[in-house]
Amino acid sequence: MNDLPKQYQHAEPEQRLFRFWEERGYFHSEPDPKRKPYTIVIPPPNVTGALHLGHALNNSLQDILIRFKRMQGFNALWMPGTDHAGIATQAVVERRLLQEEKKSRHDLGREKLVERIWQWKNDYEQRILGQLKRMGCSCDWQRTRFTLDDVCARAVRHTFFKLFQEKFIYRGKRLVNWDTYLQTAVSDDEVYHEQVKGHFWHMKYPVIDPRPGEPTHVTIATTRPETMLGDTAVAVHPDPAKALDRAEAELRQKLAAAGDKERPELESQFGALAERRKTVLPTLVKLRNMALAGRRLLLPLVDREIPLVADEWAKPELGSGCVKITPAHDPNDYEVGKRQDLPMVNILNPDGTLNVAAGAYQGQPMLKARERVVAEMDALGLLVEVEDREIDLAHSDRSKTPIEPYLADQWFVKMDQLAQSAMDAVSDGRVKIFPPRYVQGYLDWLGEKRDWPVSRQLWWGHQIPIWYAPTATEADLQKAFAGRDDVVWRRDEEQDQWLICAREQDLAEDSVPGHKLAREQDVLDTWFSSALWPHSTLGWPEQTPELKYYYPTSALVTSRDIITLWVARMVLAGLHNVGEVPFREVFIHPKILDGYGEGMSKSKGNGVDPIDVMEKFGADALRFGLAHLTTETQDVRMPVEFECPHCHKLVEQTKKNRVLPRVKCTQCGGEFSTQWADKPEDKALPRGAVVSERFELARNFCNKLWNAARFALLNLEGYAPAAVADAELSVEDRWILSRLTTVTDETTKALESYRFADAMRQLYEFAWDEFCSFYVEMVKSRLQAPQERGVAQRVLAHVLDAILRLLHPAAPFITEEIWQLLAGAAPERGLTAPAAAAESVMIADWPKAEPRRHDAEIELRFARFQEVLRGLREIRSRQNIPPKTPIRFSARCDAATADLLQPMATYFASMANAQGTVWGPQAAPPATHAQINLKDLELFVDLEGLIDLDAEMARLEKERGRLQGLIAGKEKKLSNADFLARAPADVVEKERAALDDVRSQLASIEQSLTEFRRRKR
RNA sequence: GGGCGAUUAGCUCAGUUGGUAGAGCGCCACGUUUACACCGUGGAUGUCGGGGGUUCGAGCCCCUCAUCGCCCACCA
């Protein structure tokens, strides 16, 4: 056993043990009606890139739960897999295509591009799964799924078919967020807003044949002047006076609630409003009347007649009070257009250039057209004013280019019923969300019941299983698909065609004789397949044994930003397809932020590769460290640095260098590569790992555990298993067993309620502060004593065994390594009925708390012992007495305390080289001594010949000051009649006792000081 | 604009039902006592973001302000 290294070497065991687990088939789970299942489906990582620490946290927690439950006897299944992540992945591959080959996707064509993306997917899937395995994730790897594989595809087809058949799916024109770069619609969730510098152009449109007294022009303002080409109306409020009244009332309310700071600002708005009544209102009233009279305007540049309409969307308190209406290119205008039954003129091509509807501007990009519109309006004298303005411009999260609102044909899922079902499942507790504060957001979002746009103009994804039949008649379809229940069709009145949906088999172009079918080119939103993940991976729509056994799954572990996008949709899809919720509990974990407080993401490039952390600290340190940080409310800030491979100095990670493929060391000037290295010349450089000192705690802890195990192994020679009677147990045995029972109980409870940090802290403190610092120290002498050695060995092996089990979910590798070493020295363990230990800790039983081991008296004795021990060590330290020099001490305390402490005499000797002389009320301070006052106990160390009188006096003076302050405070409290009258009696009593104690401490110090002063003279 | 969370030692974070604050790292001193220097022993360090309030008593409860982060909505 002496050949075990002093420091735990993580690299080799991690590889070896993972293989061992895999060979033994521990990861695999099969349905077994005799056992209870515990199931987690992984949130499938996107194949866009490698995993970062956020994923590492997510998966560490899942593995902790899975391993914990597996040890508790559940038939545990962790279903792994990855997500095709439609837009994100296609965008990455397209971007590279453009960068490296200067080609667009159209140069390649659909088939070739999809082929490229599959290659990418294969690379990254492998990398991702490799990262998970390296972390020790105990997924059932044989069941690994991908959201585009055949099993998932089948589920998607069945779901779409079902929804189509039930009329939950419809096709419609909708204003979508158009990404002109990727040429696809993106969902609201994929849009972010960014402040950019822009302008606010005020322009006027002429009124056609104005009558006397009527305005000749209507002024409008816009940040996007080119959209005027698509204007189909100008709106004015139907009752501008009333609208102003309301605006004023609102302002008044605000003013009443406002603080002094905002008041001037609000008051000036007040003035502006009054001004408006005088200047703008009369015009607006006239315009309103004109609108009601059906008067029309001439849209300049395209010379189109457009109506003036009365609509409440126009706010008389803003701008000119009139607003141009571009229904095809603005969400609000779209609503107005529908209300007012206006034509919708789409002026945009999918690539962001203007189309034929823009007349002379056809073919120009938006921005070019903008310049020209402005110039020409100016030339016509219709440009009134240009203001500079900050504009909150919508951008596509995927391509980072500005979004154009765009009217397009899209597929939708009707959400009213489905959303309601998902709301009910959470409201009535069939799905529980932890922490519960996330429930409200879930309900609010679903409560809007907005229909879900599911089509994407992409090539990477599940192609929508719809075929268009523009020429066929219903009779043709009936004839062609007679007797088939896997094909349904519906009339698309708007486009005058049939929509045919096929459940599993694709339809051939000529499936309807005499007509040509055209397949819908769009693919489905990624979340459509993700929504099915919990049941599609288990084989739905087949009623597989897996689906019956593992569904609903037990827990879902994810981060808060996809509660709506993903969690909500899984709930509604699960309910709709399977008729049961997909999971019982959802745990929302914190986010890992970088040193700047920003969330880690692939797009930002600030992700830290867990491999770097594992290389340096080990997988166990990564996992334990992350779990240790997983508290309920707090996101985890993780400042990181590069470790220079040349000089090993730490190089600060800045916002700039964190995305570079190669970085220059600020110390030695040597260059190194980063996780972003891609080109061969960058990859050739030595790798500079990204590290964080935040994993040192866990790394050190693993090492501590390793060394405790080394100690045990060194001392287990001659170990013989045997039942240990209670009477044979020493005081430290009873203590550590009592503590073990409490810790077992609390760790179990913490894990069961997702309090990961609590569980880790419990175990850390127990293993380090109690087991290593006290139990191991105290057991040393017994291990040397032949009569006591046997029992000591058995208890030592037993407690170490329990620690390994408790820590295994968080730190699987090191616990397994030690477990197997321990099997060599003590293959049969246990105190009541020793039995052969399992061949792997991974399949060992989770420890059960043994309440009968709990011993309050022993724990109290230890608490007092530890206090006194600390006091003795403190005196030794402040008096500078070398550890080798023995000291003598006495303790003045009541008889009961003396009885508790006296049996610990040998431990004071072994752990502080101190010998107790007098215990109890009769103890008196020796002539020269150092003292420490503990609660109800005064500790005197005899320092004859040792004392540093000045040091001791200085300390006593300081202590006296502290006590005096304390006494003053307590006296004040106790002389407060209110306190005496209102505080509970026991609190008052405690306070009195405390005061007495502190007073006697002070008296004792005064006495010593007097004595010391006398001696000095 | 609405909501959620955060603000505690130099850094990163804990803090149970309200009873004058803790950990790890870092810092200082001492130490190589055969499990461990990725260690041991001891020490120093806080107007618990500001201001009000409730209470005998507030880090904890209430109000308010400030700052940071996230989510949702809106911005001709």
Image (cartoon, coloured by chain):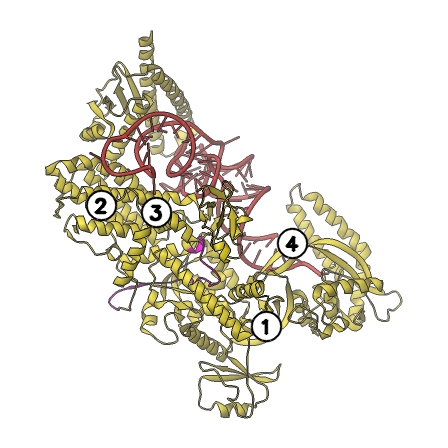
Tell me whether the residue at label 3 lies in contact with that at label 1, contact meaning CB atoms closer than 8 angstroms.
no
Range of the magenta residues? A33-55
Q: Earlier in the sequence, mark 3 or mark 4?
A: 4
Quote the CA–CA distance across marks 3 and 2: 17 Å
Label 3 SS? helix
Whether labels 2 and 4 belong to a single chain: the reply is yes
Residue A888 relative to residue A94: left or right? left
Residue bearing mark 2: A799
Residue bearing mark 1: A106
Name the tint of chain B in the rendering: red
Q: Point out the image quarter for the C terminus of chain A.
A: top left
Residue A413 in view here: no
Magenta-drawn stretch, dominant element (helix, strand or loop): loop
Given this view, does label 1 or label 2 mark the residue nearer the observer?
1
Q: Earlier in the sequence, mark 2 or mark 4?
A: 4
Q: Earlier in the sequence, mark 3 or mark 2?
A: 3
Residue bearing mark 3: A760
**Front-most of residues A374 and A89:** A89
Quote the CA–CA distance across marks 3 and 4: 43 Å
Q: Chain of mark 2?
A: A
Q: Chain of mark 4?
A: A
Residue A11 relative to residue A53: left or right? left
Residue at the image position 22 percent from the left and 28 percent from the top: A908
